[in-house]
Image (spheres, rainbow, N blue to C red):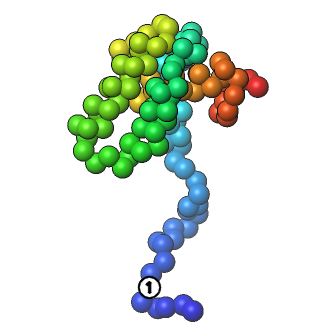
Amino acid sequence: MKMPWRRGAAERPGADPTRVPRELVDWANQTSPTLVAWANVVDATGLSDTTVKNAERFLRTYKRTFDMSARREMAMRIRSKIEAEVSPRPPVTIGSMDVIATALQMRRRQLGYGDAGPGSES
């Protein structure tokens, strides 16, 4: 039943609500060359199960942590554990979230299990 007092989404001629602006796609596709270079040489097979579980839990729940300082501290703790367990260490110019996600992804690829994600050669 159509309710006349409810407005629908503003419709513009030719507007496609599923179309993502090109600028946003370009921005999202940018990956730091430093991150790519590190990902290609990192040996993440030395990550302990505890570190992996903590990192996965953090990536699943970090958006629910409203205290930014607590979120940053947790990311730095996990990053420092990852830095101690992988070789070579990630460059300091790479953000903690990128280090955590990349280390987990590369561990999956190197151990040959789980979803290797987009861009995998398998």
- In this rendered view, identify the residue nearer to me: 111 or 28: 111
**Disc 1: which residue:** 6
- In which quadrant of the rendered view does residue 75 lie? top left
Question: Considering the image in quadrants, where does the N terminus appear?
Answer: bottom right
Left or right relative to 11: residue 116:
right
Q: Pointer 1: residues within 10 angstroms few (<14), some, or many (20+)?
A: few
Question: Considering the image in quadrants, where does the C terminus appear?
Answer: top right
Instruction: Report the label total.
Output: 1
Is residue 34 visible in the rendered image? The answer is no
Q: For mark 1, give the secondary structure.
A: loop
Q: In this view, does 88 lie above or below 48?
A: above
Left or right relative to 56: residue 68:
left
- Identified at 56% across, 11% down, the residue is 43
- In this rendered view, identify the residue nearer to me: 20 or 13: 20
- In this rendered view, identify the residue nearer to me: 79 or 30: 79
In the rendering, at what x and y percent does residue 78 appear?
38, 26
- In this rendered view, identify the residue nearer to me: 118 or 75: 75
- Identified at 65% across, 18% down, the residue is 110
**Hey, what amino acid is under mark 1?**
Arg
Residue reaching furthest to the right? 122
In the rendering, at what x and y percent does residue 97 appear?
41, 30
- In which quadrant of the rendered view does residue 71 lie? top left
In the rendering, at what x and y percent does residue 111 appear?
66, 20
In the rendering, at what x and y percent does residue 50 appear?
47, 27
- Identified at 52% across, 26% down, the residue is 49
- Identified at 43% across, 19% down, the residue is 82
Is residue 54 visible in the rendered image? The answer is yes
